Amino acid sequence: WVDTQREQLKRLGINGDWDNPYLTMDFQAEATIVAELLKFAESGQLYRGAKPVMWSPVEKTALAEAEVEYEDITSTQIDVAFEIVESPISELVGAHAVIWTTTPWTIPVNQALAYGARVRYALVEIDMSTAEQAGYTLGKKGPPRFLVAKDLAESFFERFRAEFSKAKHAEELASLLEFKIVSDFRGEKLEGTITRHPMHHLGGFFAEPRPLLPGTFVTTDSGTGLVHMAPDHGEDDFDLCKAHGINPKFVVDGGGTYKDDWLWLGGDDERRRSVINPNFNAPDGPICSDLREVGALLSASADYQHSYPHSWRSKKKVIFRCTPQWFVPMDKDMGGTTLRNCALKAIADTRFVPEKGRNRIGSMVEGRPDWVLSRQRAWGVPITLFVHRESGEYLVDPDVNARIIAAVREQGVDAWDEESARDLLGPNYKLEDYERITDILDVWFDSGCTHVFTLESGRWPGMQWPADLYLEGSDQHRGWFQSSLLESCGTRGRAPYNAVLTHGFTMDSKGMKMSKSLGNTVSPLKVMEEYGADIIRLWALSVDFTEDHRIGDEILKGVADSYRKLRNTFRYMLGALDGFVGDLSDTTEIPELELYVLSLLADLDAKLRKAVDDFDFNAYTRLLIDFCNEDLSAFFFDIRKDRLYCDGPDDPQRNAYRTVLDILFHALVRYAAPVLVFTAEEVWQSRYPEDGEQGGSVHLLEWPSIPQVRADNARWDALRELREKVTEAIEPLRREKLIRSGLEANVTLPASMVPDGFSDEDLAELFITASVTRGQGDAVTVTRTTDHKCGRCWRLLPDVPDDGALCGRCADVLGEGEAA
């Protein structure tokens, strides 16, 4: 596969040290990753802890944020009643605190409820008269009462009424159901309130009290204003419960099912399923059915649409699951700063293209949790730590670490096995006193170490740390860009890059995401077969790659048309310069038009340099194409082709034109080389074969040095505008076939339109017309000339006696014995 990828990248014109590639499975690369991990260990930036992390029940491993994709799904939403058994607010005793959740499977591991201290809550009473008619009962005596946030009471009641209408004979009564607010109070008064789990009759864990705890994360955006706490399966849940001495129970196994000894839906319960199974969480699934049976399910509907995390590999839903893992702390002191603060400063010091990337990665780092490094897989780079069985501390010994790194460098990651453990520990430690960690590293830690192996190993001479630029897709703000940033800040105190450039994603011609199932994929290999690699390169640099961009047959045809125009520009110059040897430095005798074009070239050069500095390759390509098409082909070349083909071979002005063409050639072929790598090489070799004086590759040339000349650009720009008006005035006569081209046109211009310094003969040459005269009025007028056509240059001039005869210039040229 490495060979296949190498050849495909070469075919795309990508430069690289192909005989000495960087390979992730190289033992040296693996040893580098291990060495970087042990730097974190030696500086005290690792800890082992139990925290809820994103977990894939399908792959049975923890996942990093970068390994998760969010997709829109429809979930079951439920309202569940927890009976209040104790409260400083006496009227709440016997009422029910209501929680709302879209993860019914977490109810069996609920251990508390959270409230907002500043949220205003209401005790809501449901009118019992219609409820009793429908046979609906809840609570010990009197009307059912519920504790919810006051601002959410109405929305809760609507869900309750919808569920009530499903009861037998209740549909017609639902519209009559009413509620009233008995009392309201600030959440801070709920301190000390205790509820019991809806399944408390099961005993054991479920009979334990469920306290109401103050949570700063509780809002009234949705739900009921009360949040059920399952510390095994939520970060906020874990932190709040831990602060109040409530510990996780670790009852969901790696495959996403409740363990055998769990009282509810564990053991041999035939209804036990993976918690990500939609049927398990459905309104008629085992969770909701059991809650409904005990009268605790107040509403349940499978209609809640939201974004939910999925594994990027299996494409299946992930869960938060509390398991022992290895972490890098984001907020631990590391010499007067923290990893989070160090990373945020590095982001501020780094250049981002586009600039919005700075805020994107900055907000992610600012709010991200500790970095979970461990994975439970059989393959990958191991977490090469020995942990003391009694103290729980990992061993920090530079000599042991050096032996580990040396072993991996020699044998690869297979060196970290049980048989080698005693040798790696050495004579100062007893193997039976230590646990050899068998978890492996997050692959994003691996990728975050690439800057070390590629830039610091010395394997590639000339490579220096830090990197000038990191380039990847916009999704890597939470992936490679961030893992590299955190790894480098943790070991070197700064980012491993000076600049970060992100590109968007390639869509089909309609702006749709490419998918094999939709049949709208575009294969680069097939495009190369049909158009050539330079077309792909030209397309890639012609779009705004910082945003999502499109590709398709019609788009590629347009790119191919632009390519042909560029190729024709080079073809013309190669023909015009055949046999030319000139002095590139002498511009003192060059006519004014040529000086103007050289000044345009100097302007182009400055703009291209800026585009490169700005990483604005779309502008770079557009400037190059526009210059070749508009300034050269449609203007300069069009005007000077008469001089090139019809003047004498030694004519000073013809030579001046070819001198400027030579300057243009040397500049443009260099400008085009990064874009059209194969075409530029072909053009250069066509003029300078490898065995010639200037033989070699165009890609080894330096950026061109452009003559600095002065021209009155404003005057020439005004002339070009006038030239366009003349062309527009000629066009109706050409369409009506009164003339065949501008060479047959006599043009009369208002004198006020003509810039200073141009004679009528100059204007006729620049406009490519038979003649130009100046008159009165304010409009351009065109008539057909009565002059005859020169048989050699095809110009219609007064000194041509008859059609087919020679004009004075052509007669002089031929009289010199030259057949042009």
Image (tube, rainbow, N blue to C red):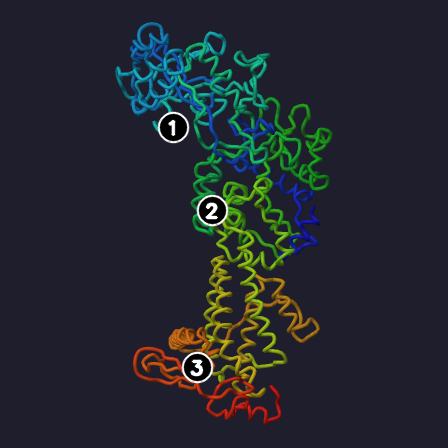
Label 1 sits on residue: 217
Which residue corresponds to the image point at 37% horizontal and 7% vertical from the top-left?
135
Instruction: Name the kind of residue labelled 2 in the image.
Output: Ala
Residue 491: name its quadrant: top right
Residue 407, image x and y in percent? 70, 38
Q: Residue at label 3?
A: 745
Q: Are marks 2 and 3 in contact (CB under 8 Å)?
A: no
Front residue of 375 and 518: 518
Do labels 1 and 3 touch, CB within 8 Å?
A: no
Left or right position of 304 against 428:
left
Query: Considering only order in the chain, which callout, 1 or 2, is on the residue closer to the N terminus?
Result: 1
Give x and y (percent) for residue 490.
Answer: 52, 41
- Disc 3 crowd, CA 10 A, few/some/many (<14, 14-19, 20+): many
Q: Is residue 318 above or below residue 411?
A: above
Q: Which residue is mark 2?
A: 346
Q: Quadrant of residue 268?
A: top right
Tell me: residue 568, above or below residue 648.
above
